[in-house]
Image: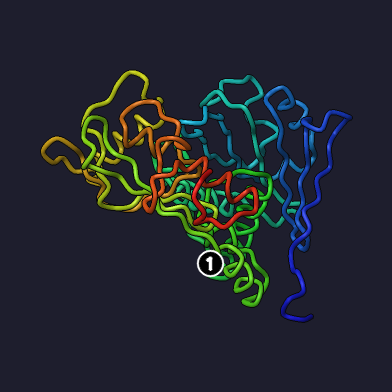
Amino acid sequence: MTSDEPVGRVVKIFITGQDPRSLRTVELDNWTGVAITGQPEFFKKALEAEVLSRSCVYLLIRSSADDDLPEIYVGESDDFSQRYLAGKFPIEFHTFLIFTSKDDNLTRAHVKWLERELWSILKGNSGKVLVANANKPTGSNLPRADIATMRTYLSNTIYVLEALGYDLFSVQERTSASPSPKQTDMQSDETTSLRIDLYSALPKRPNDRAFLRYENSAYTLAAGSKINAKITDSLPANVRKLRDQLIADGSLVTHEGYLQLERDIPFSKPSPASALVKGRSSTGYLDWVRESDGVPLGAVLGIIAAGQPADEPAQ
């Protein structure tokens, strides 16, 4: 294989019925794992799948508005076909994803380990998602060989989630299932070709600014950014919860007239980041502007989409 030959992986999706949004079974090349996903109306149908009588780890996902964060519940079960038969879900959700195995090699101890690892990773990506279960799962103690096997299973789980369009992880996490260092290097070359440095000023405080970096197709709110000390009722609910969490863990520190962010926070979209900064509902594509010339983010991305150089001024 030459260095410029494209590499990748095969994701197989089987759709039950004619509706493409119906119950789906997802498989990945050279992996014994399997995912079953769908919207709530297909949940009971999913429970009929034979593989769900085995140990599983699962996600319940509640979608969000463009300026808010999605909410996720992470769980595990040794027999998912018997779980939630009477409803009573921990959160209202728009999508469920259940990960199990096509054989019997995935045990209860394995899925408890996976549950804790997924919970920890998602909690670490707090600008991308709000984790509904507040308490850290107990996990399990596995032999070293089993941990190595489960790390491969976990990386494949992340790969499938990202392939299905769930931007929940960092670039490093979502490429952790790469089969070779050469592929990782190629992916790195592809994803580091564009960087946009942006800022947004606090309401009525034009000299107090927050800074956002767009790189690797992701957004990062930079440490040192200033955050509005005041909030309004329009601040999206999950961004409000993120703000409270950051204050509680010392990541947002009070200064005279503003709060200051003490660490980088990754975001999937620009609007939740600007909502956190402004203390209200915000359209990030307008409220974030490029540092070099003050052009709004939406206009910059439009220039790029049109095939023009990223540093070319908007017309």
Q: Nearer the viewer, residue 52 or 29?
A: 29
Q: Nearer the viewer, residue 269 or 56?
A: 269
Above or below, comparing residue 246 to residue 230 in the picture: below
Q: Residue furthest right?
A: 18
Above or below, comparing residue 5 to residue 88 in the picture: below
Residue 309 drawn at (x, y percent): 57, 57
Residue for point 39% across, 49% down: 293
Above or below, comparing residue 239 to residue 176 in the picture: above
Above or below, comparing residue 35 to residue 175 in the picture: above
Going by the numbered disc 1, the residue's amino acid type is Pro
Q: Nearer the viewer, residue 237 or 124?
A: 237
Q: Residue furthest bottom?
A: 2
Residue for point 53% across, 43% down: 315
Q: Which residue is mark 1?
A: 143
Residue 231 drawn at (x, y percent): 27, 25
Q: Nearer the viewer, residue 119 or 310?
A: 310
Q: Is residue 115 left or right of residue 306?
A: left
The local crowd at label 1, few if under 14, some if 14 to 19, many if 20 or more residues have their Cα within 10 Å, is: few
Residue 164 drawn at (x, y percent): 68, 45
Place residue 32 in its image quadrant: bottom right
